[in-house]
Image: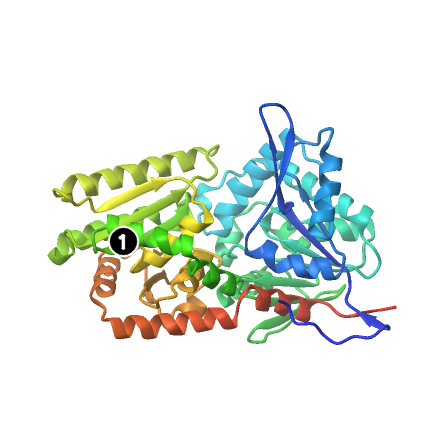
Amino acid sequence: MLSETPHNDSQRYRRLVVISNRLPITLTKEYDAEIKLIPASGGLVNALLPILRERRGLWVGWPGIPSEVGLENLLIVANEELGFELKPVSLTTKDYHYYYLGFSNEVLWPLLHNFPTRCNFEPIYWKAYQSVNRKFAETIAKSAKSGDYIWVHDYHLLMVAEELRRIGISQKIGLFMHTPFPPRDTFTILPWNLQIVRSLLQYDTIGFQSLRDRNNFIDYVRAALKGLHFNARKRISIITTERHAVKAGVYPISIDYEEFVNEAADEKVTNHVNLLKQACRDRKIILGIERLDYSKGIPERLKAFQNALGRFSDLIGNVTFIQIVVPSRSDIPEYKDLKYEIQQLVSEINGKYTQPGWVPVHYMFRSLKRSELIAYYRVADIAIVTPLIDGMNLIAKEYCAANIDCKGVLILSQFAGAAEQLGRYSLLVNPYDIEGFADTIYCAYIMDDDERQLRMRKLRKSIKNQDIFWWANSFLAESEIYSTG
């Protein structure tokens, strides 16, 4: 739980207003045309629920489907169950295609992950992005109260603060970037880079996942805008503009550590772990699990595994690589191409190395139930978490938390935000260095039990000390002030 700061009748917390692209619910339309509501789960939702309930807060976002008759009644029920208010932003099908699939996922996502050649700089996408950010701001303005703290999340809504200031909203506004922020030369490629950075400086606090991301942002602002004053500090830098001071800080997001520990020890999960061990016949299990995305480095890890099989003969027949890919953004052509590339690599590896009774790569393209996911975390002797670039990558932290036997080894990309916290006791790799990557896989395979346990205990302690509640508490404590009255 979040720690509480003592306060009296004359000093209380501000009401918290959370803004994200999606509400913390999923609305589905059944075949009978009935709309059904499913509460969302996950680290961010779990961390913010107690704060929103305590402060009788508000969450603003898109409900996931176009506004229809009956939606308001469903949200009233959800408000009562959650203990705080949900406020939907109405988006059209055109908004979804141009703002979300277009600008958010074909421009900002690849750009922020330092893949500018994958960007599609369609002017109509930019107009839709501005329009939708304006819609969010208008919805917020109708519900915002004096003294509220407005907390915006992620790259979908970078312009919201500027739109709110234009309307006349003077409340404190914070932004947390869940994605990386790219180097200056990459961000400058964006045709609308100056408009976006000026909008970002309308926030009072901007939170980044890592020092790398914060420093990239500061470097860009220094070069792009003149007349600003910078007070550089280790964790929080202050940018002073003509209007106000902007905090640019590092707040690495995390997971609900205790929840993963408890679920990993559950009898249902333990039974699943035993079944997986029997199926793999006491071979060491290597696990890769990511959603389908070109930033996750899935082809590179398959190539590294193939290289390791070719150079270290004692791996043959003694390891099983389970690669799980969770479907994502299937509407975008590049993701279809990536899926095909992964399938081809799996076929190539299995075609070359399969022996009677042993298939080197077990590939699954599907989502997992949470209990299944945690069972795979527990059974894996080695987890490969090697994005080409990532803001944080919570899979690395989830794997360690679920590793209650402390026998697992984490192979982690040096380009993941998590490397700043977990790099010392994981095995860091450059995912582009296929041969060095393969060497690291073999190093993890032959690592003795004492070293495995020492490394995993250190990793788990670090994650426990800086869990999701620590993250939320850190951002809010340094971003807001108390209101009076």
Q: How is the image coloured?
A: rainbow
Q: Quarter of the image containing the N terminus? A: bottom right
Can residue 388 be seen here? The reply is no
Dot 1 corresponds to which residue? 277
State the residue in front, 384 or 286.
Answer: 286
- Residue 409: which quarter of the image? bottom left
Q: Position of residue 374 (x, y in %)?
A: 41, 54
Q: How many marks?
A: 1
Q: Residues within 10 Å of mark 1 (few under 14, many from 20)?
A: some
Label 1: state its secondary structure: helix
State the residue in front, 269 or 465.
Answer: 269
Q: Position of residue 50 (x, y in %)?
A: 67, 60
- Horizontal arrangement in the rendering, residue 109 relative to residue 306 (left or right): right
Q: Position of residue 220 (x, y in %)?
A: 56, 60
Q: Amino acid at mark 1?
A: Lys
Q: Quarter of the image containing the C terminus? A: bottom right
Residue placed at 65% from the left, 57% from the top?
49
State the residue in front, 190 or 419.
Answer: 419
Residue placed at 47% from the left, 51% from the top?
113
Q: Position of residue 18 (x, y in %)?
A: 69, 54
Q: Is residue 235 above or below residue 18?
A: below
Can residue 266 be seen here? The reply is yes
Residue placed at 48% from the left, 38% from the top?
329
